[in-house]
Amino acid sequence: MSDSSPQRTRRGGRHPQSRQAVTDLDDNLARVARDTDWDGVRLHVVTGKGGTGKTTVAASLALALAAGGRKVLLIEVEGRQGIAQLFDCPPLPYEERKVAVAPDGGDVYALAVDPEEAMLEYLEMFYNLRRAGKALTRLGLIDFATTIAPGLRDVLLTGKASEAVRRKDKKGRFVYDAVVMDAPPTGRISRFLNVNTEVAGLAKMGPIRHHADTVMKVIRSPETAVHFVTLLEEMPVQETVDGIADLRELGLPVGGLMVNLIRPPILPDDDLSAALDDELDVEAIRMGVKAAGLEDGAAEIARALAIEASDHARRSSLQERELARLADAGVPQYELPLLSDGMDLAGLYEFAEELRKQGAA
Ligand SMILES: Nc1ncnc2c1ncn2[C@@H]1O[C@H](COP(=O)(O)OP(=O)(O)O)[C@@H](O)[C@H]1O
Ligand SMILES: [Mg+2]
């Protein structure tokens, strides 16, 4: 898939005809050539303003991509152990562990990448220096090095993801069908991914430079997509719009928009617009309240309900406005509802199903 693919600019992930075509195919074939908006993408980077549901969406996307017998690696880079919490398992060591079984078979593995461990691995790989590395760790030098050189830290983290994307087994097949990264927030994502420039000041040549170049090749390729998680509120939407512009400027591959915490409208359109203009028929509401058997204080209840309805209408119209701003970005959008009982494992599977239905995986 190339950047100019029309699928990249289509809003929404629904395309019923091609969906049908997939179900007509032999199961096995469909597994290989699943028709999604991101066919050919093997590294899914998930960013978003903090607290918008980045970890939740990354995990759901991993489940969705694994569905039907695939193997997916979910990578966490911020050391928060959010993935272990979500999947209800003990803190992840620096080791790939199976954390979930996807719908219709398929496995999700997870890894919490720690820059220090990644550095040791790197020293071992390139210099056969694991023991020396351990000594450096004890002296706190690795921690020090990655702290003073954030570019180095980032290239170690992105390096781990691109290594997992390219890793092959003895038969030459990819070990993972896809890798999903729960990445740093929107405000830092372009620097994080643009390792080339970040490392340029550190190393003009040698293995680090070479490593950065290899990582950059993967990140810039059509094999990578950077998805944005957002809420329909002004600030997160603005950050998303800016983040997309930043990536485009750097020539980094923009993926889809996962719009989280959507509140479905609970009033019909007419009532919504009346509520928005504070023109709801309070008398009619009062009659309704009375008819429902609440004689006492019906007028008061009706006034309170009308205020509630106006608030709801304002939120709905704000949501619509933000949705329209996001649509201008010209990338596929996927919508995920606010789960009123909160997010849990069942919610993750529900979101995975939702993402598949909308064509994200
Ligand atoms: N659609 C949703 N409905 C209900 N709760 C959600 C939803 N999405 C995320 N959450 C909750 O919001 C909180 C923040 O989500 P999280 O994925 O950890 O965000 P981030 O990684 O962006 O900080 C978590 O408690 C999560 O369970
Ligand atoms: Mg998180």
Image (spheres, rainbow, N blue to C red):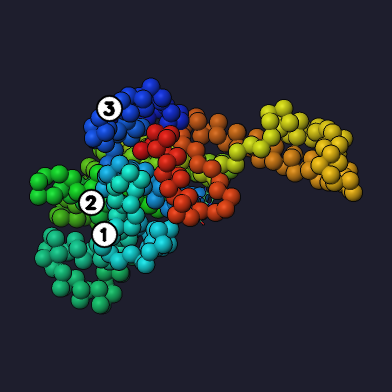
Residue identified by numbered label 3: 25
- Residue 350 lies left or right of residue 322; in this view the side is left
Looking at the figure, which quarter contains the N terminus? top left
Q: Position of residue 327 (x, y in %)?
A: 50, 30
Task: Report helix, strand or loop for mark 2.
Answer: helix
- Whether residue 338 is visible to the viewer of this picture, yes or no, is yes
Residue 321 disc label: none
Give the residue displayed 29% in from the left and 55% down from the top.
Answer: 109
Left or right side of 42 for 349: right
| Residue drawn at x 57%, y 36% as measured from the top left | 322
> What residue is rendered at 39% in x and 33% in y?
359
Would residue 54 be seen by someone viewing this image from the given angle?
no
The residue under label 2 is 164
Whether disc 3's CB lies below 8 Å from ligand 1 is answered no
Callouts 1 and 2 close, C-beta under 8 Å: yes
> Which mark is nearer the camera, 3 or 2?
3
Relative image position of residue 267 (x, y in whole percent): 69, 35
Query: Are the two marked residues, 3 and 1, in contact with CB atoms closer than 8 angstroms?
Result: no
Question: What residue would you read off at disc 1?
Answer: 96
Q: Nearer the viewer, residue 231 or 336?
A: 336
Mark in the foreground, 3 or 1: 3
Q: Position of residue 111 (x, y in %)?
A: 30, 58
**Vertically, is 281 above or below 155?**
above
Residue density around tag 3, few if under 14, some if 14–19, many if 20 or more, within 10 Å: few
Residue count near mark 2 (Cα–Cα under 10 Å), binned few <14, some 14–19, many ≥20: many
Q: Residues within 10 Å of mark 1 (few under 14, many from 20)?
A: some
Q: Looking at numbered disc 2 in the image, what kind of residue is underneath it? A: Ala
Q: Nearer the viewer, residue 255 or 12?
A: 12
Q: Earlier in the sequence, mark 3 or mark 1?
A: 3
